[in-house]
Every structure is written in structure tokens, then in C-alpha cells.
């Protein structure tokens, strides 16, 4: 004679599968970690591309590099004589009003002038003189360190 415990449906109550099981209280973090790693890789690749300015062939000079944490204002004169404020092309007549609008320190703001080595020297001097006549005093030239060092 056999005796049976329960109702004969494999320990399930009311014949429904999964009834009587406790809910899982753990969070599956694997998808979250996967997404974070993908975003990290994307930002690691994209970050250097965000700091690229107007491409110019800078002249070389033996001078120590300047240090600073903040992003400087940059005026660039490319090989065709086009003038750029940061990465936006501007005409020389509109350069000073735009500089005054974005200069946080006013006329004491440090402005870096990048001139392509193939551009006419007079064009770079004209840009610097225009800024100087407007009252900007912190104008500095940017050059590259020679590759033989």
C-alpha cells in the first residue's frame, strides 16, 4: 500500500507552476555594467576629438609650455588668412565685439594667437594690433616645440 503526501501534483499548490515560490530580491546589475562600459569606451574615444581646433601648421620655438587649467580664448589665422575665434570663422571687423562678449575677465583675459607658419606675417600682426587697440593686453603667441628635443 502506498501513501501519498500532498495532492499528487509534484508539490505545487492548486496546480499552478511557480506558486509558493518567493520572489527574487536581487537586482541583476549585469546589463547596467554593460551599458556603463560601452558609454565609457565611447567617451574615451570621443573626448580627444572634442578638443581639436582649426588645423594650422604652427611655427616652432624653443620655449617652455604654459600651464593652465581653464580653456583659453584662441584666435587662429589659417594658411589662407581666414580668422577664427575658437573654432568659428569671423571677419576682422567683428573679432573685437565677439571677444568682448565672451571674455570673462574683460580686457585682462588671456588670448592666444595661433598663426599658421605659411600665413603672411602682416595678417597675424594686424589681428594682434586690432585686439591691442581695443584694449586687450593679455595677448600671447602660440608655437610648437621643435621635434629634435
Image (spheres, rainbow, N blue to C red):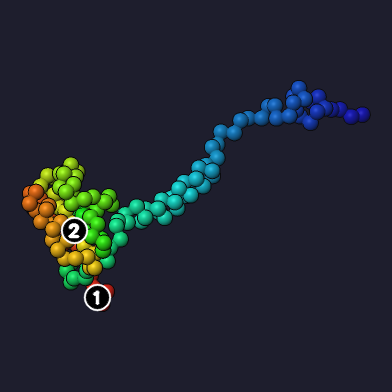
Neighbour class for label 2 at 10 Å: few (<14), some, many (≥20)?
Answer: many
Going from N to C along the chain, the mark reached first, 2 or 1, is 2
Check disc 1 and report its element: helix, strand or loop: loop
Whole-percent x and y of residue 18? 70, 30
| Residue 115: mark in rendering | none
Is residue 148 or residue 106 the one in the foreground? 106
Q: Say which residue label 1 marks.
A: 149
Check disc 2 and report its element: helix, strand or loop: strand
Say which residue appears at 73% left-offset and 29% top-offset.
Answer: 17
Say which residue appears at 9% left-offset and 48% top-offset.
Answer: 134
Whole-percent x and y of residue 145? 23, 70
The residue furthest right is 1
Q: Nearer the viewer, mark 2 or mark 1?
A: 2
Q: Decide: is 30 above or below 132.
A: above
Is residue 89 or residue 57 the one in the foreground? 89
Taking 101 as reference, is 43 left or right? right
| Residue 113: mark in rendering | 2
Corner quadrant of residue 104:
top left
Amino acid at each position: 500500500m502506498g501513501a501519498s503526501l500532498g495532492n499528487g501534483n509534484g508539490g505545487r499548490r492548486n496546480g499552478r507552476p511557480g506558486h509558493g515560490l518567493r520572489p527574487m530580491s536581487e537586482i541583476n546589475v549585469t546589463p547596467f555594467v554593460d551599458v556603463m562600459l560601452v558609454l565609457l569606451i565611447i567617451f574615451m574615444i570621443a573626448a580627444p576629438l572634442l578638443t581639436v581646433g582649426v588645423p594650422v601648421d604652427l611655427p616652432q620655438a624653443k620655449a617652455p609650455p604654459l600651464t593652465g587649467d581653464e580653456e583659453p580664448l584662441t584666435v587662429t589665422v589659417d594658411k589662407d588668412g581666414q580668422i577664427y575665434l575658437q573654432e568659428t570663422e569671423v571677419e576682422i571687423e567683428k573679432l573685437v565685439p565677439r571677444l568682448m562678449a565672451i571674455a570673462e575677465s574683460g580686457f585682462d583675459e588671456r588670448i592666444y594667437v595661433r598663426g599658421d607658419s605659411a600665413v603672411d606675417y602682416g595678417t597675424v600682426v594686424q589681428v594682434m594690433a586690432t585686439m591691442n587697440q581695443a584694449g586687450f593686453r593679455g595677448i600671447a603667441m602660440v608655437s610648437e616645440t621643435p621635434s629634435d628635443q
